[in-house]
Image: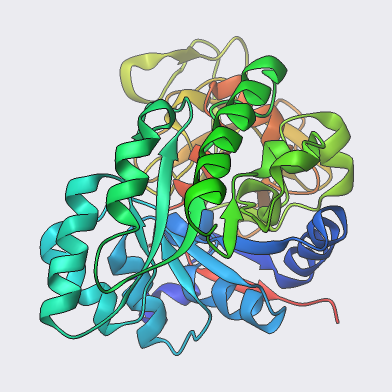
Amino acid sequence: MFNDKTFRNRPTYVEISLSNLRENYHIIKNIVKPSKILGVVKANAYGHGLVEISKELEKLNVDYLGTAYIEEAIYLRKHNIKKPILVLGAVNDNQIPLYLKYDIDITGSSIDKIENISKIATKLNKTARVHLKIDTGMGRIGVQWDRKKEFIDKTYNLKNINIVGIFSHFSNSFSDKEYTKSQIKRFNSVLRYIKKNYTLPSIIHLANTGAIFNNYKDSFYDMVRPGLSLYGYGLNSKTQKLLKPVMKFYTEVSYFKVLEENSQVGYNRTYTTKDLNRIVTLPVGYADGYPFPLSNKGHVYINGKTYSVIGNVCMDQIMINLKRNGEAYVGDRVELWGDNISLHNLSKLSKIPIGNILTGVSERVPRVYTRNN
């Protein structure tokens, strides 16, 4: 529905710079070389468009793509994406045949799951490509690192399993140095056991954006998995200076009015004018991905000036205070975030992580792709 051409005419849209994506990719590539890169494109490529971003990364000769679910991976295959794809989430047993049909790499996160992968692959006369998942301290999916022996011994003796990779996931590589080092140490203990008793997989991967830009080079191994940084964001000022945000969010003024002193604005009357104010309404709301917690906190950029969001963010509209002398007219373009409104700042104001905001931009918001060269 939302991919229909009708929605392309919405005044509310996001602009996706493929040139900035390419620059971010090359920056990451230079930092981690000779390690390979798995571009994380889960959650609609962090809101940027699953197919379009994956096609661009494929042009850049990315080594792997990473999705959260098999459905995302199949969607890419149906759109002629040929690169290897790893589904990073835990496999559901009834979906194992789909991995084999569409040539998708599977995360093997427990003995039971890998046994079922082996059984189904054998029954279908297929060989499953599996990446072993080790829990080194995230506490999510994967076999705990100190229970490696039974897991590794069992897995390496199963039929129709090609163990092509092994990986883990950092809990806080952005700011917790000691815990990150302990996770690397735990992961290395698993690798040593495999090397001593079997053959290491050809692709060992652990580093994410935090590890890449905090220079944990001993976690780069054979491949790294950048997510947020591909789309132009780090979580500190040093990293941010290197990267270029890929998404800008725009809308336009849809309505203008003048409110007298002591006028209430929005649901639940959370804002009252202190004097005569010029107010404009914008056709964007929390259903589009403009965060509700920016009610009475957010800012937008219109005609060279920054103005405040007033009242509660509605499902489909927000109100902006031009005060007494501000100027904006119906049809004027409005930047919600981009060159003049920092998404970092909006993240702090709303207390919502940047990744959550980006992935929250809904499908009814058209994506407009640009390229500088």
Picture quarter with the C terminus:
bottom right
| Residue found farthest to the bottom | 80
In which quadrant of the rendered view does residue 155 lie?
Answer: bottom left
The structure's colour scheme is rainbow
Residue nearer the viewer, 6 or 65: 65
Residue 329 drawn at (x, y percent):
66, 51
Q: Residue at x 50, y 67 (%)?
A: 49
Res. 225 in view: yes
Q: Residue at x 50, y 86 (%)?
A: 82
Residue 10 point in image, percent of width and height: 48, 67
Which x, y percent locates residue 188?
60, 36
The answer to whether 67 is drawn above or below residue 218 in the figure is below
Q: Is residue 284 left or right of residue 157?
A: right
Tell me: residue 283, above or below residue 309.
below
Q: Is residue 341 among the parts visible in the rendering?
A: no
248 or 355: nearer the viewer = 355
Q: Is residue 77 left or right of residue 29?
A: left
Q: Could you tell whether 346 is left or right of 27 in the image?
A: left
Say whether residue 41 is left or right of residue 62: left
- Quarter residue 186 falls in: top right
Quarter residue 370 falls in = bottom right
Residue 181 percent across, percent down from the top left? 68, 24
